[in-house]
Amino acid sequence: MTSFREVMGEVIKVGITAYDAEVIADCITTRKSCSWVNTDQVDDKIIIDLKNLIAQKNYGVSVTVESLATRSKYIWEIKVDKVDGPSATSR
């Protein structure tokens, strides 16, 4: 399993702020779904790059970010992918 610091470093490299990268890395390494609200601006390219990183590294999570433009806030949601048991990774 990849360490928290390794994941956080990779997430920061795609342009995610340190605060958001810390939460994302925690969700990935603890295998827990989470959501939070932040005011740090996020654009579509950064989200695409983050999703590509997640797929490339096979982190087993999905990410969505909803913009609340009228309030300058972003709602983040990380969901752990469901696995149907130990054999699911070998399919």
Image: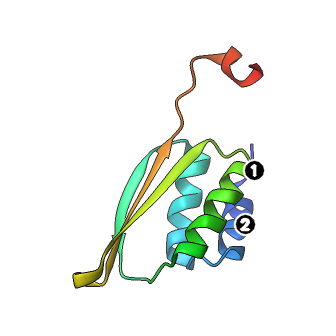
In space, the residues marked 2 and 1 are separated at their CA atoms by 10 Å
Element type where label 2 sits in the image: helix
Q: Which residue is mark 1?
A: 57
Pick the quarter of the image with the C terminus: top right
Question: What residue sits 59% from the left and 59% below the top?
Answer: 25
Q: Earlier in the sequence, mark 2 or mark 1?
A: 2
Element type where label 1 sits in the image: loop
Q: Which residue is mark 2?
A: 10
Instruction: Judge the density around disc 1: few (<14), some (14-19), many (≥20) Cα neighbours within 10 Å.
Output: few
Question: What residue sits 70% from the left and 63% below the top?
Answer: 5
Residue 84 image point, x, y percent: 57, 18
Relative to 39, does residue 65 appear above or below in the rendering?
A: above
Residue 35 image point, x, y percent: 37, 57
Residue 74 image point, x, y percent: 36, 73
Q: Residue furthest left?
A: 70
Type of amino acid at the residue the image marks with label 2: Glu
Question: What residue sits 67% from the left and 20% below the top?
Answer: 88
Q: Nearer the viewer, residue 72 or 7?
A: 72
Give the left or right position of residue 36, taking residue 89 as reference. left
Question: What residue sits 62% from the left and 58% below the top?
Answer: 51
Give the left or right position of residue 67, taking residue 18 as reference. left
Relative to 15, does residue 59 appear above or below in the rendering?
A: above
Pick the quarter of the image with the N terminus: top right
Relative to 44, does residue 82 appear above or below in the rendering?
A: above
Residue 76 image point, x, y percent: 40, 63
